[in-house]
Image: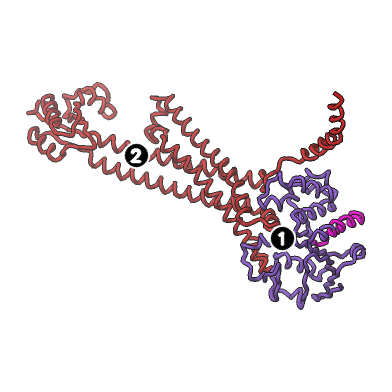
Chain colours: A purple, B red
Amino acid sequence: MGPEILRDLTFDIPRRSFQFLTGPSGAGKTTLLRLLFLSLQPTRGLIRMFDRNISSIPREEFPMLRRRVGIVFQDFRLLDHLTTYENVALPLRVRGKEESSYRADVLELLKWVGLGERINVLPPVLSGGEKQRAAIARALIDRPEILLADEPTGNVDPPMARRLLNLFLELNRLGTAVVIATHDLSLMDQVEARRMILSQGRLDIYE
Amino acid sequence: MSDSRTKRQKDAPEQASEPQQRRTEMRVRPTGPIVPSTNVSGHALMCVIAIMSFLACLTLGGVSMVRATAQSWQSQISREITVQIKPDDSLDMEKALADARDLALTFSGTTDGKIVDRAATARLLEPWLGEGLDLDELPVPRLIIITIDENNPPDFAAMRKALTETIPQAFLDDHRTWVDRLVAMANTTAMIGTGVLALVFSAMVLTVIFATRGALSGNRHIVEVLHFVGAEAGFVASEFQKHFLRISLKGAGTGGLLAALSFALAGFWQSQTLATPQTDQATALFGTFTIGYGGYLGIAAIIVVIAILTTVTARLTVMRTIYEIDLIRSDPGRTDLYQS
């Protein structure tokens, strides 16, 4: 077992809240997001999610819980053999929904993130920023209760970053709690929002 | 007229936007499969499955052919018995041959009796004694071939006793020694064949399992993404199952079909070249190249077994991969699982 990356953290993410998670590289932002996304289990401590202690939830129930959480991975995790449209529609497809029932929604969201003309393009052909937007659209498509985004504007230019931030704010207004892990100070300065600053394993929160 | 024009004008903006919307929607390509249908490991797996099913089908056909041939040798030789009469000065050979045949045919279980005539006997001895043999000059025993009902054979001991009492020079050979030897040989051949079949089947099972796992290892990232976007383990497994079922059916079908074609072609060649030295030799050694309905059913069974095997392996491997992802979740130090 390696050194503890995070310790003595106590915080909550209220419903419909909006916050930035920031801190220097290696501070544990991604680890914290992974803990919240159930892709890591804490060695000690308690995480409660949707009013349940996650260490007492059986494995079989994780998929249902993950469906309530949207995540934007730093490395996008798009499937190279699926088009942009198919990648974004994937969460709906794995929930067994008919394509005709979500087609219009997916196309609309793709247009919104500026990928309306790239729906049939495979990820290897997309630029870094386009991949980023496709990953964001995939996380948003099923209106999650909480959205975790790891450096969601890391590969886009400032106007697109502003547009994506607006998208997150819009989503937040519709009721989704949003956690954005970022280094981008200019992005954080655009919104009056809660800031969670991770440093040397400690967390300071500025409301 | 004016009404219809007004209506058309009213509809015009809608009509203009509709085609535009349709055009946008039509641009979406038909949804592709979640598991990529073609990749290098998939093709390699299909080839491995085709080769293994071809070999397994050939072995199955070959073994069933050898068994049939061994059985036919055995039944041919046990369908006949031979009465041998040694020459003697006091014996009228032709009369003794007729008497012995008639006596043998009085036993139930005999169906026919044929005296090997002088010319045939001379032909039998020709390889050793040459042509133009005069049988009167040599004390050559004469033979009677009695055909028997192999399912209801006569009482050989009683027949032997009756023959010896009537004609002391007669000797009954019921081929028991040969039959026993052939039975032993046939059983050994069938056993060796079954052993080879078991080995080929084991090799096929292991190869298919490992090739399937190998092909799946290249798709681990797909399993991970599906798992993280909320797919249930059963859903992920069923997607991979469908994909690998298709691959295995194509591969095993091709291998099985090629094996069936090989047998059909060999049988056709044999029937077209009847009575030639090559065919006679091949027939004597291997029997006829036909595997019958049983053989074709066996080939179909092999295809089904391979399909089930591949599908089940794919399912178990995907479930195990998901389990490993969850293990890493609880212990990130378990990076060894990525290499397994």
Amino acid, disc 1: Arg
The one nearer the camera, B127 or B179, is: B179
Residue A9: numbered disc: none
In the displayed structure, does residue B66 sit left or right of residue B35? left
Disc 2 sits on a residue from what chain?
A: B
Q: Residue at x 80, y 68 (%)?
A: A29
Highlighted range, magenta: A149-169
Badge 2 element: helix
Give the quarter of the figure containing the C terminus of chain B: bottom right
Q: Residue at x 20, y 28 (%)?
A: B112
Magenta segment includes B223: no
Q: Residue at x 77, y 72 (%)?
A: A12
Q: Can you identify the residue that label 1 sits on?
A: A68
Amino acid, disc 2: Ala
Q: Where residue B167 sits: x, y (%)?
A: 9, 32
Q: Can you identify the residue that label 2 sits on?
A: B70
Please indicate, yes or no, whether residue B77 appears anywhere in the rendered image. Answer: yes
Please indicate, yes or no, whether residue A84 appears anywhere in the rendered image. Answer: no
Image position of B257 with respect to B210: above or below: above
Magenta segment includes A151: yes
Between the residue at mark 1 and the residue at mark 2, the CA separation in whole angstroms equals 69 Å
The one nearer the camera, A168 or A124, is: A168
The one nearer the camera, A8 or A147, is: A147
Q: Quadrant of residue B254?
A: top right
Circles 1 and 2, Cβ within 8 Å, touching? The answer is no
Q: Where residue B132 sits: x, y (%)?
A: 24, 21
